Amino acid sequence: MTTITDRTYSLRQAADLTGFSTGKFRYQKDTLLAHGATITDEGWRIPHSTLEQLGWLGVKTPKALPSAPSALEVAEARIRELEAELLALREQKRPIFGRRSK
C-alpha cells in the first residue's frame, strides 16, 4: 500500500498541489533535486516528502490571495463609470463637451 509520503508528482501536479507556478519549480530545480526530486526523459518526479521538507505544502500562496485587477479590468471599470456619468448628464439635459442642447 502506498502512503501519501511515498507518492510522487509530475511538475504540473506538484504545482497544482502547492499553488506555486511551474516556473517556481524550475527556478528551484537544484533545491528540488537536492531534496529527492528527479528529472528523466519522462518528466519530473517530485516526492511528497520533498514538498514537505521544503515547507511548500499548506503554505498560503499568491494564488490563494486576492489578485490586483488587471489593466483591462481597471479600464473596463472606468468605461462603465464614464458611461454612467454620460447617461446622468443626458438625463439632466446638460450640454456635453461644450455643445448646447436644442
Image: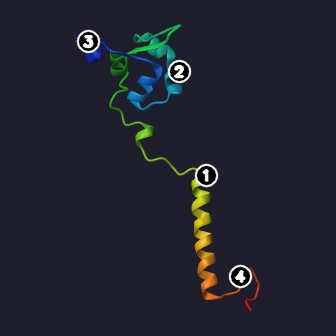
Tell me how far mark 4 sits from mark 3, CA to CA: 72 Å
The quadrant of the rendering that contains the N terminus is top left
Looking at the image, which residue is at 77% across and 85% down? 99
Residue 65 position in % (x across, y down): 42, 44
| Residue at the left extreme, as displayed | 1
Q: Nearer the viewer, mark 4 or mark 2?
A: 4
Tell me how far mark 4 sits from mark 2, CA to CA: 56 Å
User: Judging from the image, what secondary structure is the residue with disc 3 in?
Assistant: loop
Measured along the vertical axis of the image, is residue 83 above or below residue 56? Answer: below
Q: Compare marks 4 and 2 and give the one earlier in the sequence.
A: 2
Residue 93 position in % (x across, y down): 65, 88
Are dots 1 and 2 in contact, CB under 8 Å?
A: no
Q: Mark 1 highlights which residue? A: 71
Measured along the vertical axis of the image, is residue 82 above or below residue 9? Answer: below
Q: Mark 2 highlights which residue? A: 26
* Quarter holding residue 64: top left
Q: Residues within 10 Å of mark 1 (few under 14, many from 20)?
A: few
Q: Is residue 95 left or right of residue 43?
A: right
Residue 102 position in % (x across, y down): 74, 92
Looking at the image, which residue is at 61% across and 52% down? 71
Tell me how far mark 1 sits from mark 3, CA to CA: 47 Å
* Quarter holding residue 37: top left
Q: Mark 4 highlights which residue? A: 96
Tell me how far mark 1 sits from mark 2, CA to CA: 28 Å
Q: Is residue 97 left or right of residue 60?
A: right
